[in-house]
Image (cartoon, rainbow, N blue to C red):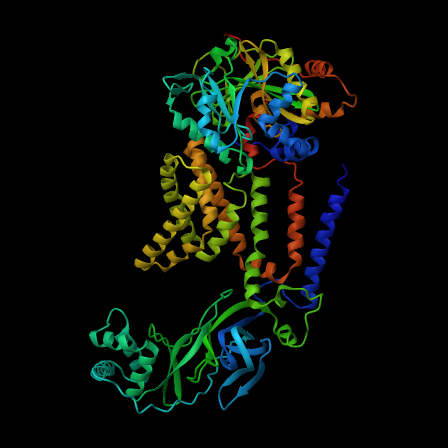
Amino acid sequence: MWATPARLQAKGVIGMNRRNIRYIGRYNDRRLYPLVDDKLQTKLLAKRHGITTPDLIGTVSTQFDVKRVVEVVKDAPGFVIKPAKGSGGKGILVVERQQDGGYIKPSGTRIERVDLERHVSNILSGLYSLGGTPDVAVIESLIAFDEAFAAYTYEGVPDIRVIIFRGYPVMAMMRLSTAASDGKANLHQGAVGVGLDITTGTALRGVQFNRPREDHPDTGHGLASLYVPGWDALLHLAASCYEMTGLGYLGTDMVLDRHHGPMLLELNARPGLAIQMANGEGLRRRLDLIEKQTETRSVEARVAFAQQHFAREGELASSA
Amino acid sequence: MSRVPFYLLVGALLAIGIVLTIFRHFHYEVPFMPGEQRQIWEVEAQVNFDADNGPVRVDLALPSNQPGFRLLTENTASSGFGLSYLRDDKARHAQWAIRQANGPQQLYYSAQLLVTDGEEEFLAEPPALQRDIGWERPYDTAAREVIGQAHERSADAFTFTRELIKEFTDQRQGENARLLLSQYERPVLLTRLLNQADVHARIVNGLTLEDGRRRQSLTSWLQVFENDKWVLINPRTGEQGKPENLLLWERNGNAVLEVQGGSDSRVSFSMLRHNEPASVAVRNQFTDDTLLNFSIHSLPIEEQALFKTILLIPIGALVVVLLRVLVGLETSGTFMPVLIALAFIQTTLLTGLVGFLLVVAVGLVIRSYLSRLNLLLVARVSAVIITVIAIISLFSVMAYRFGLNAGLTITFFPMIILSWTIERMSILWEEEGPKEVFKQGFGSLLTAVLAYLAMNNPWVRHITFNFLGVQLILMAMILLLGNYTGYRLLELRRFQPLAKDD
């Protein structure tokens, strides 16, 4: 039931306190936080750096404009409304399609115009933002996620989290939403986390609720056959976020779009530690290795370095 | 990035804190344990009145040595007033006077009283019987009947008084008693009846001493004489004998406060207990407050009482830091548990827990309805605040009706904080489900209870209030904890699957 601190230390597992002081505190300049805490700013910044993000349909920034939201989304078949300063996936509303003046969520539930307006109004009041500060609602077009993942997800979009440390991709996982997680991709809510090999982008290991998992609980599809097409391009995109933001310890959330390839969904200056569970490995050894690197390298060189040093064998029985 | 300045700062804080604490211990002989000293009460009387734009004279009765209390020092503060202490044959007075005053005036008198365990009785001369008691009809008959009843059931003056009071208590209150109570105040009425029955008795005024109380007033007690003895009887319950914490402020049956040339006068009392050895208590009469004797004790008592609580907050903060950094407990709102713990100190633990759970549970139900009304956030939280106030008022009234006086203390809860807690929990419920709500609610309550236990510990209270250096030590400890990079206790479980051998 309990592990000894010495045992975790030996396995190179990083705890919250160490993450906060040793990595976030040391490598992430507070001044740069607004770049990632405000999704609208991140989007505009990404655009300047040529990094693809989901299309911006519009924004709502005053309560007066809340009634306008219906106007804004009129021509979009599916869309996502999120708080610009939200965290942990809170306050994100996904609408798959519009039907007779109503809006259908991926779960099939229908919401009305008032529900949509109330949600936007709540976002503006700061209900979901850090510290409850007034916020802006960002409306993006729905991602058409790659069919390769259709068998691995329930309702939600599977996203790929890559931890970028001083520009090097150190660890990656894919988060698959489940019925238990209510279509959300948060591991503590019951999404399945699949550790990905940095070298190849193939599945290493799956966990749900901290327990090993060999298949997706809803679709029953084996996780062993999961791999991310265009892995190198995705890693390049993720690694280049270091130059874009200047943050040394960064969580990048990416998706694979059917038409546009890898896209940046959002950045996180305080990425969680669940990625260690999904990979069945502590971050410490990899972070220590990166900290020893003194020479400045290009994005390509950094990705190559990571792929050379962090290769691993999958633990899943490849029976799928 | 060098950590040397950090450790220098922590070291300096620790060193200064320890030196201050040791200095205070040895130089001022403040002991580290609360038990081994004499208790001293500081009592402050505040006289308020409106002057009528002319000469004013204020007479305030003063306490004197009595069994259980010895007067150490006394001070007054009164700008512009002339002051003299008067002592007639038995009683002591402070008399303030001024030629010209207008508008609201404030006069202060404070006394330090040493708690003694003297059991010896002080002598008091019985007052003369008031022979000329006139009762109007129909009160005369009622009075005679009540006296007659009590007389039959009693043997001496003391038992007679007790029986008389029983006539006026709720259970046995008869028609006669109700009639008399409608005309006279209870203590006055009782002395009249006692005098009527040839019992020597008078009203004296006492102050119930409770640590940290402010804006208290005097209560009336009956002093009943027979032969050479006298006893004090509570006119409300009939209980006999002086409670240990009762200070007789005025014991000759005279007025406590007389104001000439002013109106709307009243006197209220603040009090504070602290522990010092008797030697220090005596020395305190002469030493002025120097910079080295920098202590909370140089403040007025009302402010000191406030500080007694304020100085405990760092202890609560330390508990929160410990639980967050070393244990990894999740709470709803970082320091909300400390505020709840402060409320627990006023309400006592069990009442506090029950009250908190009731208010939050009912609040959540009402909040779930509010969420359907589709309101703006600030308006909704304001509505929750009003709801919380309504719940608290309702519970107070209900508790009072059912005779649960403890229920009244529910008003000590920080209402705005409670409202935000309800709002946050409600959102958590909608987004993450009830499990997360219970998890965070449990974490918050556990933190609050632990903070309460730490803050309510007599030793902790003694140390924080008497040794300001301890605050610096606490600061250093919290800084050190802020530097801890090891695992949290709950992470040992969370990451347990990673520790397995593959």
Identify whether B343 is placed above or below B381.
below
Q: In percent of the image, x 36 and y 90: which residue is there? A: B227
Tell me which corner region of the image, top left, top right, bottom left or bottom right, holds residue A197: top right
Residue A200 in view (yes/no): no
Residue B355 in view (yes/no): yes
Report x, y in % for residue A182.
43, 23
Identify whether B453 is placed above or below B180.
above
Q: In percent of the image, x 51 and y 50: which residue is there? A: B339
- Quadrant position of the C terminus of chain B in the picture: top right
- Judging depth in this view, the residue of B203 and A215 nearest the camera is B203
- Judging depth in this view, the residue of A181 and B49 nearest the camera is B49
Report x, y in % for residue A251.
61, 24
- Judging depth in this view, the residue of A241 and A285 nearest the camera is A241
- Judging depth in this view, the residue of B97 and A60 nearest the camera is A60
Report x, y in % for residue B463.
60, 60
Q: In percent of the image, x 56 and y 24: which residue is there? A: A277
Q: How many marks?
A: 0
Identify whether B270 is placed above or below A140.
below
- Quadrant position of the N terminus of chain B in the picture: top right
Report x, y in % for residue B142.
21, 81
Identify whether A183 is placed above or below A314.
below
Q: Is B66 left, or right, of A162 in this rendering?
A: left
